[in-house]
Image (tube, rainbow, N blue to C red):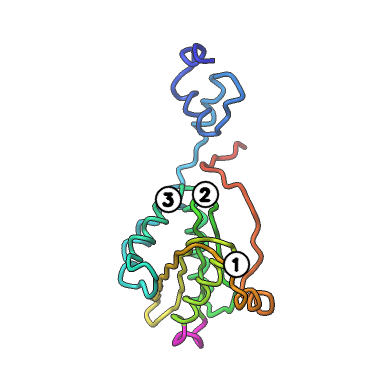
């Protein structure tokens, strides 16, 4: 297959790489893959989110929470960032509408870290910090993770939000009290395993 690579264009080689298909011989047909690649930067670019969060970190157990959080976010691929941003936006929407919903969450076995997103109803504003800490810890335990980042979303006057961040990281270990709590009063929605594609492509009509 090595020699055949020189018989096709660079666009075709990149297209075949994007869909991670090494089972077929290099071909110009993969040029169509590159041409259909979506320009979806706005879906996964979270630079605006992480540029202002350092002052809102309210809990951690490492003493280096800012760097721990930024490191975990930096590990995410663009497809994973897309899912992160979608849950971030949905949590803001639910908090703005003052809807009580179960936290949204996502975890990446590849990095060993999970994220939990907590929309805060107005009546729980004053206790949101304790709630975020407890839910971050519980989510880490529930998904058997070593690390977890929690975010809570609380609307304030003027259409602004207070978004608090929390990080906890230490090896997972069995906790009988947490087991009982999650069995009797599990605050989380069910999770499912899914394979997230790295790139998105436009559908042809």
Looking at the picture, does residue 6 appear above or below residue 197?
A: above
Q: Secondary structure at mark 3?
A: loop
Q: Nearer the viewer, residue 29 or 65?
A: 65
Mark 2 neighbour class, 10 Å CA radius: few under 14, some 14 to 19, many 20 or more: few
Residue under numbered circle 3: 75
Name the residue located 40 percent from the left edge and 81 percent from the top edge: 156
Q: Nearer the viewer, residue 161 or 117?
A: 117
Report the residue that reaches farthest toward the right: 184
Tell me which label, 2 or 1, sits earlier in the chain: 2
Looking at the picture, does residue 198 appear above or below residue 74?
A: above
Tell me which label, 3 or 1, sits earlier in the chain: 3
Looking at the picture, does residue 54 appear above or below residue 20?
A: below
Disc 2 versus disc 1: distance between alpha carbons? 17 Å
The answer to whether the residue labelled 3 contacts the one labelled 1, judged by CB atoms less than 8 Å apart, is: no
Name the residue located 53 percent from the left edge and 63 percent from the top edge: 172
Disc 2 versus disc 3: distance between alpha carbons? 9 Å
In the image, residue 106 lies at what x, y percent? 55, 60
Residues shaded magenta: 121-127
Image quadrant where residue 191 sits: bottom right
- Mark number displayed over residue 110: 2
Residue under numbered circle 1: 142
């Amino acid at each position: 297959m090595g020699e055949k690579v020189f018989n096709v264009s660079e666009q075709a080689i990149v297209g075949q790489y994007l869909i991670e298909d090494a089972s077929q011989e290099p071909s110009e047909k993969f040029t169509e893959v590159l041409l259909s690649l979506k320009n979806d930067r706005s879906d996964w670019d979270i630079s605006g989110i992480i540029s202002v969060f350092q002052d809102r970190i309210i809990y951690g157990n490492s003493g280096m929470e800012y760097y721990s959080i930024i490191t975990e976010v930096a590990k995410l691929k663009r497809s994973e960032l897309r899912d992160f941003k979608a849950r971030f936006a949905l949590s803001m929407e639910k908090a703005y509408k003052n809807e009580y919903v179960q936290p949204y969450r996502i975890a990446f076995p590849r990095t060993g870290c999970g994220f939990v997103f907590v929309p805060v109803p107005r009546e729980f504003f004053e206790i949101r910090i304790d709630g975020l800490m407890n839910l971050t810890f519980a989510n880490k335990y529930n998904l058997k993770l070593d690390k977890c980042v929690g975010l809570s979303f609380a609307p304030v006057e003027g259409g602004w939000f207070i978004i608090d961040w929390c990080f906890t990281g230490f090896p997972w270990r069995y906790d009988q009290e947490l087991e009982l709590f999650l069995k009797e009063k599990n605050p989380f929605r069910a999770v499912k395993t899914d394979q997230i594609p790295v790139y998105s492509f436009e559908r042809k009509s």
